[in-house]
Image: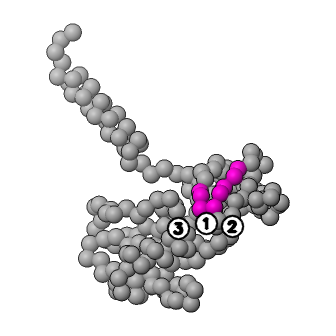
Amino acid sequence: MKNNPSLKGLIIAVVVFVLAFGIYFFFLAKKNYYLVDNPTPETYYFKINNGSEGIISGGQYVNVDLNNGKNSIKVFDQNKKLLYDSAFEVNKVRGLINIAHKDYYINRQYYGYNLKKDSLLLALDKTFIDGKPYFGGAKRFNKLYTEDFYYNVDEEYDQVIKNIDKVESRSKIFRKQDYLNYYKEYYKF
C-alpha cells in the first residue's frame, strides 16, 4: 500500500475522536440515576413497582431503577409492618425518593464572573429552619419524590464551571443537617 497522507490523517482523526468520547463517557459524563434516601436512624424495607424487596438502613442511600411515568412504592418499618403504599410520577432522568418524609433543602448555587455572592443571597428569599433565617432562598422539600435538582445528595457542587460569561446556577438537594453544615461552611455573613 502506498504512503497516503490523507488516509493517515483520517485514521488519526478517528482515533482521537474515539479517544475523546471515551474519556468523556468514562470520566467526565454526569451519571443519571435515582436514589432512595434514608436520613433517619431507622431501617426501612421497600418494594418499588412490586419488584424485589429492598432494605435501607439509617443514613444510607440506595440506587434504584424507576420507569418513566407512574411508579409505585410500598414502605415497611423494621418489623415489616406496612407504613404506606404510594404512587409518584417520574419525568426526568434523576430523582430522589424521600422514604421517611423528612426535610430536605434544594439550594441553588450561583457561578459567574464578577459575582457578588453576598448581595445576591441577600436579595433572594429567606428560608426559616428551626426558627432561624437562612439567606439564599433554599426550598424545603418533605414529600415522597422530587426531581427538581441538578446534584443529588451523594454529589458535590462543581468547584468551577468554565466558559461562563454570565451568572448561572446549579441546584443541589441536601438532607437538613447537611444543608446546615454546608451553609455554615460556605456562606460567611
Task: State whether residue 148 is above or below residue 23.
Answer: below
In the rendered image, residue 38, in percent from the top left (x then y), is placed at 63, 62
- Relative to residue 133, is residue 164 drawn left or right? left
- Residue 56 in magenta? yes
Q: In the rendered structure, are the residues bearing label 1 and label 2 in contact, judged by CB atoms less than 8 Å apart?
A: yes
Q: Determine which residue is flagged by label 3.
A: 173
Q: In the rendered structure, are the residues bearing label 2 and label 3 in contact, judged by CB atoms less than 8 Å apart?
A: no
- Residue 184 in magenta? no
In this view, the mark in front (1 or 3):
1
Quadrant of the frame with the N terminus: top left
Image quadrant of residue 41?
bottom right
Q: Determine which residue is flagged by label 1.
A: 39
In the rendered image, residue 30, in percent from the top left (x then y), is placed at 45, 51
Write the residue at 28% across / 68% down.
Answer: 165
Task: State whether residue 155 is above or below residue 171.
Answer: above
Write the residue at 41% across / 42% down.
Answer: 25
What stretch of residues is rendered in magenta? 54-61
The earlier-in-sequence mark between 1 and 3 is 1
- Disc 1 marks which amino acid? Pro
